[in-house]
Amino acid sequence: MDTDSLRLFVAAAERLNITAAGRDLGLAPAMASNRLAKLERELGTELLHRTTRKISISQEGAAFLPYAREVLAQVEAGRAAVGAGALRPSGVLRFAAPSSFAQLHIIPILPDFQKIYPDITIDLRLSDTRQDIIEGSFDLALRCAPLEDSSLMGRKLADDTRILCASPAYLEHSGRPMTPDDLEAHRFLSWSSTTPRQIIHADGQTAVLDPTKMMCRTILDDGTSQRLATLAGMGISVNSLWSVAQDIEAGRLIRVLPDWRLHDQSVLWLIYPKSNVLTPKVRCFMDFLINQLDITKLMGKRCP
């Protein structure tokens, strides 16, 4: 089983087009088809279903794909270790990130990355629902949570401080809570569930934030929607400082109970599978994000 055949299979599986994948690798259509068929004979299974109209990945092909990507990643890292890495980093980098964070902080700086590394294609998958990095065959992912999975490696990007905030119009109409107990008289925009959460004061005192005891008429599972609903005056919400720092600075939002924050120890992590070597394309993208993102803004140090 040679790496060129694996590279062809991965490209064909990603593009669902054997001819285009072969062309990218300098292979004529007939040669690409023959090489893929040879790989399937070696494995004893069909990796891609072919009809006259379309290509689709088989169940066996989907199961084999993460292993093929990992073998290629290992080869790329090995070449880099012996000097072949002097070549420019290249290839497709699959990156999963929360959509709300990516829209605000990653997509605006991607043009600069592409100027520096024109041979890297970013396959960016955005969702505020956590994606399985191993099952999804991602090279890298951004997580806003404690790093608990022992099968993953991580590099800390910043603390993820989460605060209570509301619009000036809402507070003018409904009043400003002065203590955690006052929250029960307010409308609350819940994030994906109404499970009670603990909040902590700057002096270490704790209290419980229980959406079921508040007027919780809206539940949202998307960070951008959460922020927009808060700006629209729909109630008090919990938001990460990286999401609302600019709005607070501009006066569009006001921090509620400013000495309190959510007590969940969340951190922004760049994570990758422990079994994977850190390939040049992944390493340069991680370094770029850490160097280019405004960590002061993410941590809310300019916010009251």
Image (spheres, rainbow, N blue to C red):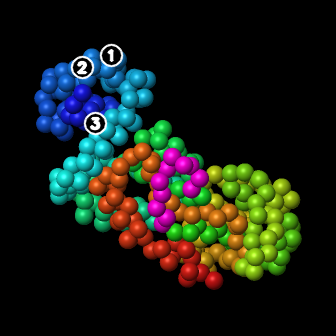
Relative placement, left or right, of 165 versus 1 is right
Q: Residues in magenta?
A: 147-157
Q: Is mark 2 on a helix, strand or loop?
A: helix
Closer to the camera, 151 or 285?
151
For residue 44, which numbered disc appears in the image? 1
Where's residue 122, x and y in %?
A: 34, 51
Residue identifier under label 3: 11
Q: Which residue is drawn at 67% across and 77% down?
A: 254
- In front of the other: label 1 or label 2? 1
CA–CA distance between discs 3 and 1? Answer: 20 Å
Residue identifier under label 2: 37
Relative placement, left or right, of 23 versus 138 is left
Q: Which residue is drawn at 42% across and 29% down?
A: 63
Q: In which quarter of the image is the C terminus?
A: bottom right
**What amino acid does circle 1 point to?**
Gly
Which of the 4 quarters of the picture holds residue 163?
bottom right
In the rendered view, would you say 130 is above or below 51?
below
Q: Residue at x 58, y 67 (%)?
A: 160
Mark 2: few, some, or many residues within 10 Å (few <14, many ≥20)? Answer: some
Mark 1: few, some, or many residues within 10 Å (few <14, many ≥20)? Answer: few
Where's residue 166, x and y in %?
A: 70, 71
